[in-house]
Amino acid sequence: MIEISRLCKTFGSNIVLNNLNLTIPEGETKVVIGRSGTGKSVLLKNIIGILKPDSGSVKIGGVEVTSLSEREYNKIRMKMGMVFQGGALFDSMNVAENVAFVLNEFMSLDEKTVRERVAKYLAMVGLQKIEHMMPSQLSGGMKKRVSLARVLCMEPEIIFYDEPTTGVDPITADAINNLIVELSHKLKVTSIVVTHDMSSAYKVADSIAMLYHGQVIAEGTPDAIRHTTHPVVKQFIHGEAQGPITEDENLIFGHIK
Amino acid sequence: MLNYLATFSGGIVFRFFRYLGEITLLLGQTLYLIFVPPFKGSRVLIQAKRVGPGSFLISALVAFFIGMIMALQMAYQMTKLSAEIYIPNVIAVSLTRELAPVLTALIVAGRIGAGITAELGSMTVTEQVEALQAFAVNPVKYLVVPRFLALVLMLPVLTIFADLVGLVGGFIICVFKLSISPPLYFTMVIESLELKDIFTGLFKTIFFGAIIALVGCHQGLNVKSGAEGVGLSTTTSVVVSFILIIMADCLFTTVFYFIFQV
């Protein structure tokens, strides 16, 4: 279980997370939606410890991680994996080396075992015989799937997905959604998916939380969110140009309404 | 106007010392992490191959021509004094103490330091550095330590080769243009050189290597925006490395001269 309470993060004068509260029960897939630049990725990076919050608490499995030393945090990180927006594959390594990164870094396994594991996890994400290819030779969708295979190699208890379907065609996006659902059901991993793709959100979520002005303004099952009467959430999920979000931004930026 | 100048120059001085502070912090982290497991020699070896064999040809070529140029420039003055015989001495001492170490360092800063910044910079903007952190891998241990060790170990080796090739360049001019016999050239070189000349030159290159690695890595890991940021950081990396190498050289030369009398 992940419990986030009163989390704050600012960059200069820009308040990105403002007393954010969010709980993700064990084995659940929580989708965090919100406009670009609302701090969804910043939230993930605060949980995984890439960014340090200004204040607030992040508890992972009951352990307060914000006060941990880097070495202690690394022990928690070994149970977590993150699929980055662009894949973040190491471009000096081929696909096999990327997928086997954690195995080579932390475990002393023989070559045959590593090869078998790489093939197993690549097959799990629907990829075969691409071990020798370099990241530059892969399409966007393949990169994301290789990135997921690299995370799966860690056998994590928690997986963070940063915009997993952004920039890929609808068919690949659906394949990635299916993978997220399948992994959640089969491996019982706890997942946080950050996205603004609503069809993806409805498909993979056990529950959806909407981030706005650094806070969670609405939370519920996909059905509850779909039928919400909250004007901000409504405007966002229906993708309307006119509504409280754009009016609010006009106010913030000082434009004439 | 004076106020403006004071504020402007104060800002530059402040930024310079802040930058030095950041580099010093990175040095501290790097030195600490060298002794923290896991120890992956293969990573150092990969980087050492890039620095050493990769830069050998260009540094040797430059040293060769510098040796020739020095001999010719010396000849211009020394013939007036009928002192051509001492040209090998001057070449040997100035090459080993000063020219070979500094020029090799500047070549490596331009070639390897810029490469390090561009590589780490593009890793930073494509979230690969953050991916390392997410996989519980310290980016300084994984990226900076191998590059630091490779440069600190390989720059003295490259300098030794530059010393030798530079002497060959001088040899060609002295023998074929100034009619100094080959045995005499080598005798003059060996007689003029003391071990301390070679060691002071090589000692400096350890620090030059550290400067190139730290500045290159620091610039790469602190790239702020996309492709433009990588380009700017790469340029800054080369410029800062050049300045710091020359400053360090001046410092070492002063220390050697006034304190150790060498």
Image (cartoon, rainbow, N blue to C red):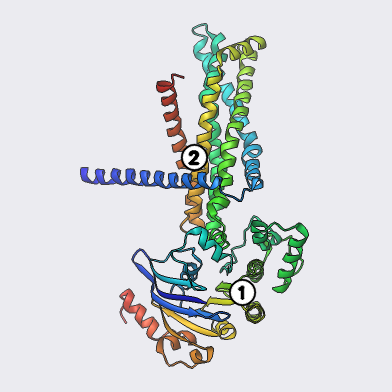
Residue A207 in the image: x percent, y percent? 52, 85
Residue occupying image coordinates x 57% and y 68%: A82
Q: Which residue is mark 1?
A: A168
Parent chain of label 2: B
Looking at this rendering, what residue extends furthest in the left direction?
B2
Residue B211, disc? 2
Residue A123 in the image: x percent, y percent? 74, 72
Looking at this rendering, what residue extends furthest in the top direction?
B82
Residue A178, disc? none
Q: Tell me which corner region of the image, top left, top right, bottom left or bottom right, holds residue A131.
A: bottom right
Q: Residues within 10 Å of mark 1 (few under 14, many from 20)?
A: some
- What amino acid does circle 1 point to? Val
Separation of marks 1 and 2 at Cα, in angstroms = 43 Å
Parent chain of label 1: A
- What amino acid does circle 2 point to? Ile
Q: Residues within 10 Å of mark 2 (few under 14, many from 20)?
A: many
Residue B223 in the image: x percent, y percent? 48, 55
Q: Nearer the viewer, residue B140 or A110?
A: A110
Query: In this orientation, does residue B214 appear?
Result: yes
